[in-house]
Amino acid sequence: MNSSRGKPKGNPTLVAALKTLKRLQEKHDGVVEASDLKDDEQRILLVETGFLRPVMKGWYICSSPSDNDADTTAWYASFWAFVSGYLGKRFGKRYCLNPEASLMLHTGNTTVPRQVTCVTIDSGTSKVDLPFNTSLLVYPDKNRVPNARVEVRGLQAWPVAEALCLVGPSFFVNNPREAEIALATVRHASELLPTLLAGDKMVTAAGRLAAAFEFVKRPDEAEHIQKAFAKLKITLKLVNPFELAEPTITPSKERSPYVLRLRSMWAGWRQDVIDVFPPAPGIKQQAADYLAQVQERYVSDAYNSLSIEGYRVTDELIERVASGDWNPDGDSQHNRTRDALAARGYYQAFQAVKESIGKVLAKNNAGLVAKRDHHEWYAELFGASVTAGIVEASQLTGYRRGPIFIRNSMHTPLPSDALLDSLETLWDLIETEPEASVRAVLGHHLFVFIHPYFDGNGRIGRFLMNTLLASGGYPWTVIRMSRRDVYMKALEAASVQGQIKPLAEFIAQEMNEWSPERETKNNAKG
């Protein structure tokens, strides 16, 4: 934390600066250019107090005063908004992301990339170095900027069909999930033909895409491409660009890239979970005995529970600064109150989850139980905070209605307009999955991956995990605070690197390692 940050008391200058920043934050998604802040004194004050963080000369992002220099959260949360703002300011619409980056955006990839490549109509070549080893590569090539560009997340991009024709075979090897999703969003092969028939250089691409359609079980599209070239007396050589053993998306009319991604992740990961997780023991105990063991673990589970919070300038914050009731280093009394309410809410939610587990033990479908009951868990989790006036009651009525981010993660949770379809897909996948281990591991991860609430996603995700573990007779599993870093790295490996095994292995280890005696000893050490 910057040493220059003090504790303002009713600071009217900071209040005015925060009001300006709030307007800019809402207008530009947390990205601020120096020229947007007409008052240099406000800009300097916001940087000194930690509400603004420099990105490059003349550009800033909104940040938290509690962030240190190594905290990546604000940058990852603002990455795409910054790229959009910077490119728009510098080039207007006279640019386009390259085909690879275009497809990553179209297919709902949620990972912040290390480098984005942008092609311009007229400019020099440059590499813009950005925070935390990210960068923007810009080079001119008017022939690689299409006339019919589309806007995705405020960025100029190639249409899906054209981009698929232009990416090389390595894209299908390095990004198979995105390649499958892109193919699934193409309704008919005729969308590809204007690009594929444009010149001799596209014959290889045509053979590659025809083979790709055959691989994903859409032979009619493969045949359509071959017949179009046959009319020109060209016989295509079909070379499957995928290295997957089998496709992870079955043909359907679904076009949402987020829904397709969830289905692909589930199909592509389920065998990995089965391979590393112990076989389900089955429900052998009486429900009362199982629930008694669940209750035995309550204290340990509550002690180890963690939350992940985001940060934005709000009207409440501005009011606290205006009244002098704000401390950049944190308010110990406020934190104690919040923690006490969180503990009470956790207890009430835990009891609600136990009731849901009772339904599962009575052989009700675990996915249906969780689908129907998870809102009740959430309401109980924050009920005490609503009563105390800390949380608005409206926040308990549904899912978040805006963006959110996960601290220090390169994964960006799904946009709010994708939540309902994505959650409906997740419940369907859980309901129809025959293996309890897969239900629990993938159900937990994908719920957190979606991040449907503004707060409490991790706690609800672990409640979901344990409800689904119960469906296979597995014991209630405590994720220990002492292994928090391992847990977070495993979640990140799944969300960013597409590797689910570390998380499945971690949960299996936690399930086998817990005991009341060991946990009492660990807590005493803490």
Image: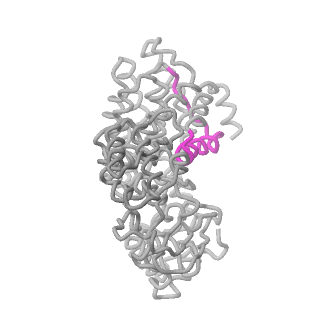
Q: Residue furthest right?
A: 525
Q: Position of residue 108 (x, y in %)?
A: 42, 52
Residue lying at 47% horizontally and 59% vertically, measured from the top left:
201
Q: Taking the image as drawn, is residue 345 in sight?
A: no
Give the main secondary structure, helix, strand or loop, of the magenta stretch: helix
Q: Does the magenta stretch include residue 489?
A: yes
Q: Quadrant of residue 303?
A: top right
Q: In this view, does 125 lie above or below 226?
A: below
Of residues 168 and 286, the one nearer the viewer is 168
Q: Is residue 15 visible?
A: yes
Q: Which of 484 and 392 is in front in this view?
A: 484
Give the residues in magenta.
474-499
Residue 414: x, y in percent?
41, 51
**Residue at left offset 49%, top offset 30%:** 270
Q: Nearer the viewer, residue 182 or 46?
A: 182
Could you tell me which residue is drawn at 49 percent across and 61 percent down?
Answer: 77
